[in-house]
Amino acid sequence: MSRLARWIGCCLALALLASAAQAHKPSDSYLAITVQDGQLRGQWDIALRDLDLAVGLDADGDGRITWGELRAQHGPIAAYAAARLQVQADGQPCTLVVGTQQVDEHTDGAYSVLPLRLACAVAAPKALSLRYTLLADLDPQHRGLLNLMVEGASRAAILGPQAPLQTFTLASISRWQAFADYAQEGVWHIWIGFDHILFLLSLLLPAVGVWAGRRWRPVDRIGQAVVEVLKVVTAFTLAHSITLSLAVLGLVSLPSRVVESSIAASVVLAALNNVWPVFHGRRWMVAFAFGLLHGFGFASVLVDLGLPQGALAVALAGFNVGVELGQLAIVAAFLPLAYALRRSWFYRRVVLVGGSLLIAVLAGVWLAERALNLKLMPL
Amino acid sequence: MTSPRRLLRPSPWQRLCPLLLLCLCALATAAPFTPASDAQVLATVPARASDPAARELAALRRAWRQQPNDLATALRLAERSFAQVAAEGDPRYIGQAQAVLQPWWTLPNPPVAVRVLRAQLLQFDHHFDAALADLDAALAAEPGNGTAWAWRTAILMVQADYARARQSCERLAPLATPLIGVACLAQVDAVTGHAADAADRLRAALAAHPQADAAERLWGLTRLAENEERRGAYPQAEAAFRAALALGLSDVYVQAAYADFLLDRGRPAEVLTLLADGARADVLLLRLALAAQAARTRNADRWRDALAARFDAARQRGDTSHRKEESRFVLALKADPGDTARALQLAQQNFAEQREPADARILLEAALAARQPAAARPVLDWLATNRVESVVLHSLAAKLKAQP
């Protein structure tokens, strides 16, 4: 695969070269520095036109810089670059080692791509200082466009003679903080996502009883209700965690209109099942099957929130945990109340039947709205 | 086109799905690669071996490296570098010229020649007031500096300060050749209610001085062509453009102006031919993209994407000197109704800084597209106050007034 990808990459690069080589913009370099698990790495893209001015690349003066000419100058290029970027971690200088160069295309032509290894005395530094003087003596309008990635969070800065020394604090969002932030979003989403709550409620309403044929009978002990609720909630959780992960990782994707309409349909079916029972005691299966759909709904929310590229797993886990916590809160509020009321006429007729019918009607309207792209309700 | 930023560490899904990664590689335009052969050409630069201009520049650079503090050597290289900007459209030469002038650049009172050149470099980056301050100081010390008067006039024209531009021309006339003297005043008259008269005088002056320097004729012919085009005298305008191009001087400005003329006449195919040799500057890339779209060529998307990436790159470095081009790009090539507000904002910001007919036009067009006639008020005032004659501008203004 890698050979094929490289081959495609080369062909594309050549095609672009023909279009972009003639086009010009002011001189920029692209410097990416990554701090991951306390370790520093980097990549520095410097334009061949700039290196030709600074180091001299077009050895035969024919106006064409070949890969052979560029390769021959790797030593001088690496030395030139390394001398013009001083990195300090917490005030201690880091040693910079330039690796083997590659080539890349930016909007104005070909660049030498220099991998950087930074060895710093301080492990997990709190502040990073960059003294950037590339081309400062040859082109004061040159800028270094910095992309600093700290444990998954990126930030940009413009380096150059206008501010040769810049210091960045690395006390960025910690993994725990990111996890907590996404967990909070998960809780919030389940609470404001009425369709998920109503789906869950539809499955929970009959949980304080058992079906005997077409008749619903309240349970005797709370233990029975708890087991039933656990089965439903666990199945729902398991199912939507699976599809949420698959969708966020980009392995499966469904059109959002299909997902949203199916979620509405799942609420209708779950609610009607309480009036005209079909699934009886196997509601956990319903929870699992439709939970798969709800997972896609959660995924679109998470993607809209923006995913930290370096901490995808943290975000995914945090959001998922948040959704579960939000669900548990709903269950914790619902179960004692339903258990206390389970024998009353009010619960059996008004809540179980009336409430389910109301939910079915509401979800039916959602279904129509989402499937036909209409706006029927203010909510 | 994707931004040049990319992940250094593969994200989980990249690890999970090599197939997806492959597809992504095929879509993404940029990924570092190791060329297959030493003979592969990666970039082109001016050829020292065959191009006399490149050789001269290289020799000047060598001399400067030996004596970076020698004023005469530095000035020669800086002036040569600045001239290269107009020829190639490569803004890198601006920074290189500035680097050469570094020992004098921050002096409060540098030598007059440095001041005049510094003003030229400053105006390129749209620092018009700083440039004017340098030119005024240079002229106070050396009132006979024709270059300084010429640049002063040019900046005042961009700022639509026509009264002071006229005075500047009057001071320039006795110092310059007769052709420059006439052309300078004609360019002011052309936008202050005397366009026909200005065209006649300029044409007569060009005819009377056939031996004038090619660069002077280029300047005069370009001014004549633009004036005739504004008046709606299209055959005369085209003749002047062609005469200017026939001089054989590489000049980004006249190429862009003629490309616009052809685009307005519905002749995009000729623009593609005109600029086929290479769209070195953003301004030319824009015309190529517009022409490719109008002619529906297969390259249209590629030019458009290249240009979009260029504006993104400029934004990344905090550069705002391309607002006119970007506004036109957004308006004509993005074709998303949501973008008209941004095009208008860019055109407004641009007109606050530069007030030439082309700047006025893009603001009128953007205001029309955004259906915000009030936003074009500064252009309407400018048209009325100076009695600017222009078929295109007045027709756009009429449309704008008719807009409910």
Image (spheres, rainbow, N blue to C red):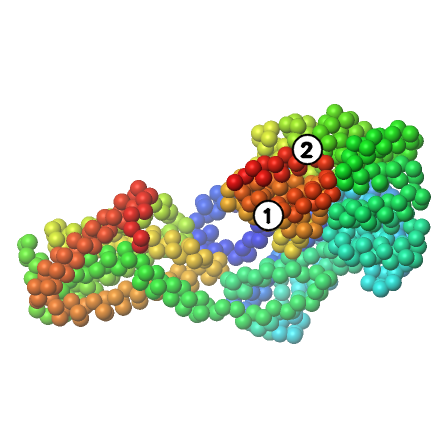
User: Could you say which quadrant of the image residue A23 lies in?
Assistant: top right
Earlier in the chain: of badge 1 and badge 2, it is 1
Query: Where's residue A289, x and y in %?
Result: 24, 51
Q: Which residue is mark 2?
A: B391
Q: Which residue is mark 1?
A: B375
Please name whichever residue, A244 or B100, is drawn nearer the observer in this view of the structure. B100
Query: Where's residue B44, x and y in %?
Result: 73, 41
Chain letter belonging to callout 1? B
Residue type for callout 1: Ala
Q: Furthest-top residue in view?
A: B235
Q: Crowdedness of circle 2 by 10 Å Cα count: few (<14), some, many (20+)?
A: some
Are the two marked residues, 1 and 2, in contact with CB atoms closer than 8 angstroms? no
Residue at x-position 65% and y-position 47%: B378
Residue at x-position 69% and y-position 47%: A25
Residue at x-position 68% and y-position 30%: B262
Residue A140 as seen in the image, left or right of residue B216: left
Which structural element holds mark 1?
helix
Please name whichever residue, B232 or A29, is drawn nearer the observer in this view of the structure. B232
- Does residue B187 lie above or below A31 as drawn? above
Chain letter belonging to callout 2? B
Residue at x-position 61% and y-position 68%: A168
Image quadrant holding the N terminus of chain B, namely top right
Please name whichever residue, A348 or A9, is drawn nearer the observer in this view of the structure. A348
Which structural element holds mark 2?
helix
Q: Crowdedness of circle 1 by 10 Å Cα count: few (<14), some, many (20+)?
A: some
Please name whichever residue, B17 or A346, is drawn nearer the observer in this view of the structure. A346
Residue type for callout 2: Val
**Numbered mark located on residue B129 in the image:** none
